[in-house]
Amino acid sequence: MKREDKKSEDMNDNFKKDEAMLKYEKETGKYAVWRGIVTEGYKKWKKGEKVYNRDKERISLYVSEETKNEWQEFIKNSSYSTISKLIRESVKVFIEENPLNNSGINTLNSQTISNISHALKEPLTTIKGYSQLLLENYRENLNENILDTIRNIFDQSILLESKIIGFLDDIQVESPKYDILLIEDDLATIRLIKSYFESKGYMCKGVVSGSKGIEELRNSIPKLILLDIILPDLSGYDICKTIKSDKEYKTIPVFFLTAIAGSEVEKNLEETGADGYILKPFNFSDFEVIFDIIDKKG
């Protein structure tokens, strides 16, 4: 089980802060050290530069004056100086009062799990992608304050993604034995494909991350692998190369199942060693080639 936040807090606690750092944290409510590294905000403050107050400026931009005043009144009478701190504390209290261990996850309704994973993953993917795009391609057009904000958004999205991966990795679509291993992070798609294959007399097992797929291969070798390219932890291209470079697994046919343009996928077929691909949205007739391969393997 991953403990990124606890690890970061321990690193901060173990870092010996001087008086200036403590003064900065008291005045601004921000970290002078995060994950064992001195923050850019503290460095600027020490030089006498303006420290960007995300909370005040954001709330001024996006809410009415009445709402802004209500928030300012709230923070005067509470220990929560930022909305994010309030959210973190609320989530912590909820988890403590409603513990959800592995057995609890397994008892959740599958539709509920799918809804949770979609709600968490889809906006995060967009936020992470756009922040990375800005950092890589538009750095020169942005001032330092905006860059600091975008870097923070990107870093936090990485941490949150790790937590989501940990959650999804505990969820599996069970089947006693199978012909096809489906590595796909969308549970609704897993259920749909699994149901179709079973109606045709083929057994399929679905897992929701690349690392879980590699782990599953160690337990059982399928007749064929259907592999999404965009997964929450590993790239499908890298997974395929790993499979095809292993003497025990390299003879397993691997087909990409992806929403990426076919022309782009074809560029990577030779390098990855994949045997083919099926594009999303798919028609069930697209899987006929897979049935032919499985039937030939017996």
Image: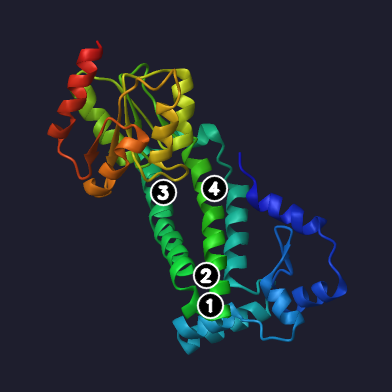
Task: Give the spatial CA distance, label 3 vs label 1.
Answer: 31 Å
Task: Give the mark, 2 or 4, whose residue is nearer the N terminus.
Answer: 2
Task: Give the mark, 3 or 1, whose residue is nearer the N terminus.
Answer: 3
Q: Which amino acid type is shown beneath numbered disc 3?
A: Ile
Instruction: Report the mark closest to the observer, 2 or 4.
Output: 2
Q: Where is residue 204 in the image (x, y as percent from the top left)?
A: 31, 24
Q: Where is residue 186 in the image (x, y as percent from the top left)?
A: 34, 42
Task: Give the spatial CA distance, label 4 vs label 3.
Answer: 13 Å
The circle on residue 181 is none
| Residue ID for mark 1 | 146
| Residue ID for mark 3 | 116
Q: Which residue lies furthest to the bottom in this view?
A: 65
Classify mark 1: residues with Cα within 10 Å, few (<14), some (14-19) or many (20+).
few
Instruction: Report the mark closest to the observer, 3 or 2.
Output: 2
Which residue is located at x 44 percent, y 23 percent?
A: 217
Q: Position of residue 114 (x, y in %)?
A: 37, 44
| Residue ID for mark 4 | 163
| Residue ID for mark 2 | 150
Q: Is mark 2 on a helix, strand or loop?
A: helix
- The quarter of the image holding the N terminus is top right
Looking at this view, is 259 or 67 the one in front? 259
